[in-house]
Image (cartoon, rainbow, N blue to C red):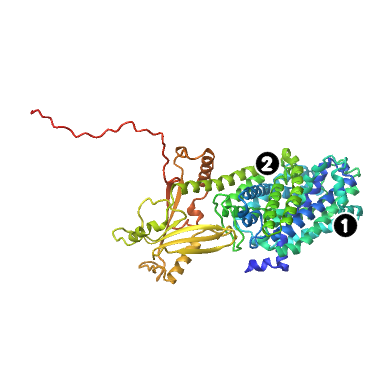
Amino acid sequence: MRKQRIQERSLIGMLITLGVVYGDIGTSPLYVMNALINDAGQLKNATPDYVIGSVSLIFWTLMLITTVKYVLIALRADNHHEGGIFALYALVRHRAKWLIFVALIGGAALLADGTLTPAVTVTSAVEGLKGLPKLGAFSQYPWLVPLTVTVILLVLFMIQGFGTAVVGRSFGPMMLLWFTVIGIFGLINISQAPVILKAFSPVYAVQVLFNPANKMGIFILGSVFLATTGAEALYSDMGHVGKANIDATWPFVYTTLILNYLGQGAWMLTHYQDAAWRNATNVNPFYAMVPAGGQIAMIILATVAAIIASQALITGSYTLVDEAVGLKFLPRMIIKHPSNVRSQIYIGAINWLLCLVTLGIVWLFQTSAHMEAAYGLAITLTMLMTTILLSQWIHMKGHRALALALLFGFGALETVFLTASLTKFIHGGYLTLGLTLVIFLIMVVWFFGNRRRLRYNQANEQISLLDYRNQLIQLSHDDHLPVFATNLVYLAKVDHQHRVKRAKVYWFITINETNRPYDCSYSIDMLGTRNIVEVQLNLGFRKSQHINLYLRQIVTNLIADHSIDPQYSRYGITQPRQVGDFKFVVQNQQIMDLASNPTMGQFDRLLIGGRVLLQNITPSPAIWYGLAFSDVLEETIPLFTKPATDATLTNLTVHHARTPQRNSRQP
């Protein structure tokens, strides 16, 4: 109910949206114009045509990609109020099998590029300390910025496991202050060089791309693209705040961002020929346009905004991984809920992996200028993949012409941005693309390895519970055997039992993942008995798969419906009790010898072997199903229930035992 209230347009919902959604894109003024100066080489090369054209490119990039594509179109492609590339894929995956690769590439790129976001935003904010007069010679130490950033990020990652609901309440007001301040400073500087307002004309954006004075040419778009890197996160966070609140707040955010970019451009126009600045190669106009008396306060505010942006990215990574696990793109991971907020989760493995990679990036690149060279390359892949999926969704809605227009229009635009960003490859883009490839391969091995495994298992043996119904009924009533459990629960597919187990009620539970993010329903088949229950549990890709959350409720409902007998316990602390004890059987499939199966191709062996390897280094099924404190029997079984045969095996001879003959001679 609380989530529903937040998703409706309201002042509190809009305030929360400012703190949750816009951290990444809202801190882009910290480094975008700085990157454009680096492209020019020196501030003196940032001529009026270059500056006005660059700001015009930023304005129209934000207008076309963020406003039109994401705010006006993508937010309408919600999967029961949830957004993001995986939620979008769940809507359209039935249209074509190849769309799985689009989703995997986009998701992998988004996760990989996210490792760079905390590093570049916090570093850009803290770099305001360099050259600050009040710090004296201390401000010139090369380790000052990396060390400060390391401390900030390390603390941030350490507090994730405790939950950030309390801290999160202050995010909205702080980001409201941030956007207001950067808009005001931008407006002040615009008044000093009103000519910058020419940037609203797209003519200047086109001219700068083909201006001979622009040494980067069309590749300048690699830096311009940094202004819109948070657009994909905007779409992914829709489920937390609702599209109504994003629609209401984006005009304010867009206005303040453009005012700040215009203000930075105006400052560059008034200082690019000053003797004190013209030879500068690493000047950040974001801080330079702030009066000296307000720079420390701006550094503090920028650092807070960067921390908020990093926090949003970290929690967004948890959500993305959670969705990927639900869609069976990634192996099972331990997911915790550190607070009472439904949408807030914590994945320790992802948290510390992000921490390790992010801090490694900080010390590898050390300056925001070097990080900017690597930033944004992978996210262009995600945006291009989102465009493909969006076009499929629009086509599914019956708007074929609009779908083609979006595919070729935004597809061409983002392909240009991707091409321009490829210049970053040798300057650090190899890192994010390498991470993208690693994550993509893990997803491919897990998803397709699981499919191939199921295919070979189904080819080996297909059985029905109906074939064993009479045996289970007899076993349940066989007084010659001790009762193994009142309720014996088998999770997912059962290949075979290691030994006979007598129970009052046998449960066979299959979990089905659905397209709806928060689906939670089940169906029952009693197979004409009172002690065999086949349960089809339908869970959305954002629902917990902890069986104990649902099973006791299902048992209680069946007893109330008189479908099964009450399970009174003669002994126990809590009396009377209708539900008896539970024992869970979880089967852990392992490969005995892939090479012994001649019908399996080499590629299938690689996929299945990789899948089992990932299975063995990730949490066990018992932990994944929330049974860590339950009575669980884990049985290790061979992956293929029928051993392979070799037609070349030849029977050479058979020796039969001979009956010994009695010796006829007398002793």
Residue 35 sits in quarter = top right
Viewer-nearest residue: 264 or 502: 502
Q: Is residue 545 above or below residue 40?
A: below
Residue 209 in the figure: left or right of residue 551 = right
Type of the residue with mark 2 = Leu
Q: Is the residue under label 2 in contact with that under label 1 (CB below 8 Å)?
A: no
Please identify the quarter of the rendering in which residue 596 is found.
top left
Left or right, residue 322 beside residue 114: left
Identify the residue position indicated by label 2 in the image: 431
Spatial distance from mark 1 to mark 2, Cα to Cα?
A: 39 Å
What SS does tag 1 mark? Answer: helix
Total labels: the figure holds: 2
Taking the image as shown, residue 497 lies to the left or right of residue 256, namely left
Question: Which of the image's four quarters has the C terminus?
Answer: top left
Q: Which residue is mark 1?
A: 188
Q: Nearer the viewer, residue 530 or 118?
A: 530
- The location of residue 442, given as percent across then percent down, is 58, 45
Q: Nearer the viewer, residue 159 or 626?
A: 626
